[in-house]
């Protein structure tokens, strides 16, 4: 299946100070990140604060221009300098921001906020736009009487529903939701997440969900991409990622997931210390300074993303060595079984090719 959206080798560096001599210092927010979102897919970007999740989302939305790399929609590269192409791109890719109060104009009514994209793109007659606003309010679970209210008259969850309705107004193919529930009360977080999941299923709109909460990912997402210090540590379908994580960082994140089970033994955190400075990222594997299983190769050589299963990739020298050892052991065991069977005069059921 052709990807709806692709980010290829995205690099984003932010200059922080100019040196009198030599190169200026930069924040390595992203260093060669690849990402693909299929039509109708709900994919999560996860990682600690400072891993590059929001920067990647802003690059995908065109709110931040990448230092290098390209964004493709339906296989065609997006040109940020072509205003007509950029306008068409933004109609198909819409954001939902973290803070719903900051993202809504306090002077506008809810109806004006939801209708604004329709006005900007000249979609439908005035009466059809009003009808569309009513439909969107109903779609996100808000009564029609909310149309005349202002953002300060709504709760946090209700404001986020308005933001989602505005994102849906143009019928986008992809919604980029940046921590859409982190500013909300715990009691309403599940409601907003269930709404996003329902919209994904009923409308077929793809969703890129930025979060640091893997418990959310496990329950509603199809696939997850784990970022660490501006690089992809691991990615794959959620069932494979949670069933057999290959990267030590992914395993550490999963060990930190709280489960409401009094009989479950709490696991000791396997990652110590803070994420290194993105101005001077460590050489080799960027996780090696905190990794409990790092070897010398991790300190010297940057690991490549290797395939561990269908669409499941991880960048870890130790996991790759372990996989090779397991494959060698399995091959030797199979060869030994064949030899024993032949010595006994039996025809083996399988042979190594």
Image (cartoon, rainbow, N blue to C red):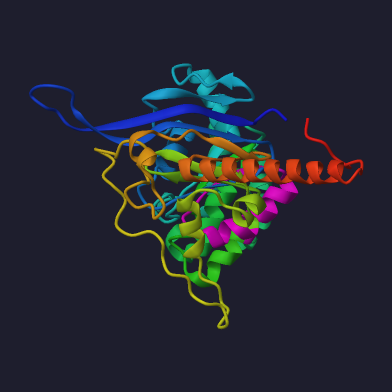
Tell me if I can see residue 149 in this picture.
no
Q: Is residue 210 magenta?
A: yes
Question: Nearest the camera: 58 or 15?
Answer: 15
Tell me if I can see residue 3 in this picture.
yes
Which quadrant would residue 75 be assigned to in this image? top right
Q: As displayed, is residue 220 above or below residue 96? A: below
Q: As displayed, is residue 333 above or below residue 156? A: above
Q: Is residue 279 magenta?
A: no
Question: Nearest the camera: 104 or 44?
Answer: 44
Question: Nearest the camera: 277 or 283?
Answer: 283
Magenta-tinted stretch = 194-219
Which quadrant would residue 54 be assigned to in this image? top left
Residue 1, percent across and down?
A: 73, 30
Name the dominant secondary structure of the magenta segment.
Answer: helix
Residue with the most extreme bottom position: 262
How many numbered circles does the render carry? 0
Residue at the image point whose x is 18% and y is 23% from the top: 23
Locate the C terminus and report the quarter of the image it occupies: top right
Residue with the most extreme left position: 20
Residue 132, percent across and down?
A: 67, 45
């Amino acid at each position: 299946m052709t990807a709806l959206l692709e980010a290829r080798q995205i690099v984003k560096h932010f200059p922080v100070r100019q040196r009198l001599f030599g190169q200026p210092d930069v924040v390595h927010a992203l260093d060669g990140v690849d990402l693909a979102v299929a039509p109708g897919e709900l994919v999560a970007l996860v990682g600690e604060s400072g891993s590059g999740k929001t920067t990647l989302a802003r690059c995908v939305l065109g709110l931040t221009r990448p230092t290098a790399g390209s964004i493709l929609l339906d296989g065609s590269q997006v040109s940020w300098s072509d205003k007509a192409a950029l306008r068409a791109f933004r109609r198909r890719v819409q954001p939902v921001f973290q803070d719903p109060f900051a993202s809504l104009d306090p002077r506008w009514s809810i109806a004006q906020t939801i209708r604004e994209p329709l006005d900007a793109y000249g979609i439908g007659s005035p009466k059809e736009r009003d009808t569309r606003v009513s439909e969107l309010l109903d779609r996100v679970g808000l009564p029609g009487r909310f149309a005349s209210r202002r953002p300060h008259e709504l709760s946090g969850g209700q404001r986020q529903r308005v933001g989602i309705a505005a994102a849906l107004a143009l019928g986008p193919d992809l919604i980029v939701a940046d921590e859409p529930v982190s500013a909300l009360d715990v009691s309403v977080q599940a409601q907003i997440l269930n709404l996003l999941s329902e919209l994904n299923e009923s409308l077929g709109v793809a969703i890129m969900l930025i979060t640091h909460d893997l418990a959310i990912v496990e329950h509603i997402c199809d696939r997850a991409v784990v970022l660490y210090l501006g690089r992809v540590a691991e990615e794959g379908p959620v069932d494979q990622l949670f069933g057999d994580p290959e990267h030590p960082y992914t395993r550490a994140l999963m060990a930190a997931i709280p489960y409401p089970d009094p009989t479950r033994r709490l696991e000791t955190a396997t990652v110590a210390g803070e994420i290194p400075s993105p101005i001077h990222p460590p050489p080799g594997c960027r996780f090696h300074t905190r990794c409990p299983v790092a070897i010398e190769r991790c300190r010297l050589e940057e690991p490549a993303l290797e395939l561990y299963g269908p669409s499941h990739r991880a960048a870890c020298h130790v996991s790759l060595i372990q996989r090779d050892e397991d494959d060698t052991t399995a091959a030797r065991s199979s060869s030994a079984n064949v030899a024993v069977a032949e010595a006994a005069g039996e025809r083996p059921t399988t042979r190594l090719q």
